[in-house]
Image: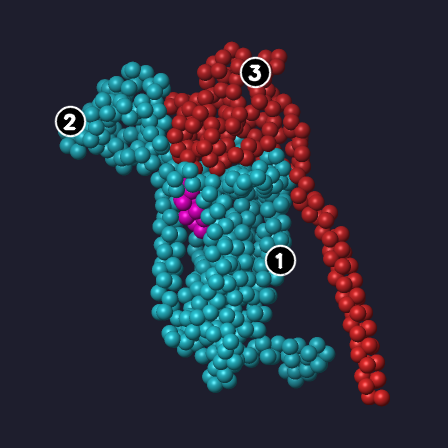
Chain colours: A red, B cyan
């Protein structure tokens, strides 16, 4: 008798534990699924980077720039968000190399991205952060920068100099 | 009073709050004796964090997390009398939190309190250390002045050094192709919601572990931790000489926390909030971004390491540092705790503190940064008022030489001091150096006319320990005409 009851009990326990196991799994799976359903769109929004088109921005007339000179120009991003304020601007160093040819250098030092400054009398770009120096043609003159200054595509259209808006160069 | 007591009894009856919190307050802690005051650093860090929550909420209620308006909204906050103070408290509170979590880490490391069974206490603490640094970085960035703007760019460029995903990671930090409208909102969300949520989570776990494992007893030489017997030994210790946490030990935490609050507020009132730089306008080229004091050492480190190692240091440096902190309790989880039996632990702390202070100082001086604001040398330094030497001094300035080379206390310190260049170099040697350049000096080949070179050499050669032309008063009067 006693043995039978014991057996019955064990059987019940066994059934109980199977049921518990199933319910545990069900809860864990449903919980994870629910969390994922809620999280995926949020993470997706966070990871989804806004792609902006590249467009040509006029930065001045060809004759505004002397041949052989380097000047600071500013242009607006291709489609800035209305609340971007001044950060919608991008600055570049524009060098007129000949009658119709220009080079547009990114302001960002290729070392860690600080804004390089043009020293007109010295014909050099100098970075205030770690002292990187570039020649007028953007080649590294000295200091830590690993690469020449990055360039923006630039063209002359109807007597106007235009720069193609581009992503910040990550070196 | 009687009514209050009745209300409390009723509240406690239906909530059971004293049954829940009572044991937490009265849980026994070991007698810390002489080192009792060293045990207040953790609660002090938490106090600093609480200051940050209170002032942070106040600031967030006036701050506009928009790339175009954040700067103006901070100007507005700073313009109100209390806003100014709150900003100052938030800034000094951040400093306090960093200093205190650093001291707390050092204390725990020296006393080897990370050994069994408190490995997870240490690991959650490492998480909190990381989050605190992230809060510091994102916080100074929310100032959204020129330095804040360039901090984002520099962070993106550093992340860009990561192999394979670097480019994506860099643009992820920028929240797009360039710094623009979406950028600041993201850092705001990280600083105000995401990282604080993690801090709450980790602080909760950290405190739970402190209660669960009991606070570590002060170490004693010759009493190593043996995981097999430690817990029973610790319980015996508590039974013999434990004292209730509240108030026997907690009063020190309260006193020290009060001093922390007092110090932060006093500094805030005396010094005021960190100054806002120029607006975050990338077209303003006169920008010299500098990190806050707690990252200056890293800024300096990146300037002095050999160039080939840079990619490795930027990515592997922090990764190795983190891995060391994580592995420490897993590798050294038992054995001697006393710093006297672990003399190298003093060396590790001394080395770390020295490196952070030394490189922090170097980063403050930033000898590698050209002094681009340097003006033409004054006449007293040049020594004469006309002629090739004066013209040479002008060339020395205009060609940027002065930004890196100091003469009689004027100019930069990136290159050698040229105050006595005439004593140490011949004109021929100077010419070679000027034309060929060096690792950290551009070549001026093709960048100087013959005339410019000759006056520059005349100027440099006139730099002597004993001035060749003595400077009589007569000459200076002459210059005054």
Instruction: State whether residue B419 is above or below residue B352.
Output: above
Crowdedness of circle 3 by 10 Å Cα count: few (<14), some, many (20+)?
Answer: some
Report the residue marked by disc 3: A61
Mark yes or no: residue B236 visible: yes
Crowdedness of circle 1 by 10 Å Cα count: few (<14), some, many (20+)?
Answer: few
Marks 1 and 3 sit apart, C-alpha to C-alpha, by: 53 Å
Q: Secondary structure at mark 2?
A: loop
Instruction: Say which mark, if any, is on residue B197.
Output: 1
Q: Is residue B299 left or right of residue B211?
A: left
Residue lying at the far top in this picture: please name it: A99
Residue drawn at the location 57% of the way across and 33% of the way down:
A168
Instruction: Say which mark, if any, is on residue B432.
Output: none
Q: Chain of mark 1?
A: B
Residue drawn at the location 50% of the way across and 54% of the way down:
B322
- The magenta region covers B292-303
Badge nearest the viewer, 1 or 3: 1
Residue B407 figure quarter: top left
Instruction: Say which mark, if any, is on residue B469.
Output: 2
Q: Is residue B194 left or right of residue B398?
A: right
């Amino acid at each position: 008798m006693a043995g039978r009851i014991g057996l019955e009990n064990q059987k019940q326990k066994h059934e109980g534990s199977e049921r518990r196991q199933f319910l545990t799994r069900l809860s864990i799976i449903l919980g994870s699924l629910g969390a994922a359903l809620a999280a995926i769109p949020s993470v997706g929004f966070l990871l989804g980077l806004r792609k902006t088109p590249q467009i040509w921005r006029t930065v001045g007339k060809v004759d505004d720039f002397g041949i052989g000179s380097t000047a600071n120009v500013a242009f607006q991003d291709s489609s800035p968000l209305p609340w971007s304020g001044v950060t919608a601007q991008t600055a570049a160093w524009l060098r007129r190399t000949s009658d119709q040819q220009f080079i547009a250098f990114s302001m960002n030092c290729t070392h860690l991205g600080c804004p390089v400054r043009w020293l007109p009398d010295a014909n050099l770009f100098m970075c205030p952060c770690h002292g990187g120096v570039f020649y007028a043609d953007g080649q590294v003159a000295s200091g830590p920068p690993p690469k020449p200054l990055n360039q923006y595509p630039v063209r002359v259209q109807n007597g106007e100099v235009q720069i193609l808006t581009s992503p910040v160069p990550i070196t | 009073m009687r009514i209050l007591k009745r209300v409390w009894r009723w509240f406690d009856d239906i909530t059971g709050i004293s049954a829940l919190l009572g044991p937490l307050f009265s849980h026994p802690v070991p007698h810390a004796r002489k080192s009792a005051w060293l045990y207040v650093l953790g609660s002090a860090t938490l106090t600093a964090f609480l200051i940050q929550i209170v002032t942070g909420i106040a600031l967030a209620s006036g701050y506009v997390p928009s790339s175009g308006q954040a700067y103006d909204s901070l100007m507005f906050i700073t313009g109100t009398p209390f806003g100014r103070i709150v900003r100052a408290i938030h800034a000094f509170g951040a400093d306090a939190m960093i200093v205190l979590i650093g001291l707390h880490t050092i204390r725990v490391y020296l006393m080897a309190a990370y050994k069994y069974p408190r490995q997870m206490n240490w690991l959650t603490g490492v998480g909190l250390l990381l989050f605190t640094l992230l809060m510091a970085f994102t916080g100074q960035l929310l100032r959204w002045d020129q330095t804040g703007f360039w901090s984002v760019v520099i962070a993106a460029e550093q992340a860009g050094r990561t192999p394979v995903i670097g480019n994506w990671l860099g643009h992820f930090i920028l929240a797009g192709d360039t710094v623009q409208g979406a950028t600041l909102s993201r850092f705001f969300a990280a600083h105000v919601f995401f990282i604080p949520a993690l801090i709450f989570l980790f602080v909760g776990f950290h405190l739970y572990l402190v209660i669960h494992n009991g606070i570590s007893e002060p170490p004693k030489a010759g009493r190593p931790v043996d995981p097999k017997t430690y817990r029973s030994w610790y319980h015996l210790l508590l039974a013999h000489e434990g004292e209730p946490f509240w108030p026997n030990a907690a009063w020190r935490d309260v006193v020290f926390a009060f001093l922390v609050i007092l110090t932060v507020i006093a500094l805030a009132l005396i010094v005021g909030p960190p100054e806002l730089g120029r607006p975050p306008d990338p077209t303003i080229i006169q920008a010299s971004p500098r990190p806050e004091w707690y990252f200056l050492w890293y800024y300096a480190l990146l300037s002095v390491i050999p160039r080939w190692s840079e990619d490795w240091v930027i990515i592997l440096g922090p990764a190795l540092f983190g891995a060391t902190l994580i592995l420490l309790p897993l590798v050294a989880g038992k054995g001697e705790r006393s710093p006297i039996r672990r003399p190298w632990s003093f060396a590790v702390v001394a080395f770390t503190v020295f490196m952070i202070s030394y490189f922090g100082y170097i980063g403050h001086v930033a000898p590698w940064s050209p002094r681009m604001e340097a003006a033409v040398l004054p006449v007293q330094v040049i020594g004469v008022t006309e002629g090739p030497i004066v013209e040479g001094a002008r060339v020395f300035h205009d060609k940027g030489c002065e930004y890196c080379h100091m003469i009689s206390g004027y100019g930069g310190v990136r290159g050698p001091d040229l105050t006595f260049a005439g004593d140490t170099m011949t004109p021929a040697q100077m010419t070679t150096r000027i034309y060929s350049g060096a690792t950290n000096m551009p070549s001026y080949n093709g960048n100087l006319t013959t005339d410019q070179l000759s006056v520059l050499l005349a100027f440099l050669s006139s730099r002597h320990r004993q001035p060749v032309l003595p400077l009589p008063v007569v000459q200076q009067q002459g210059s005054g005409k």
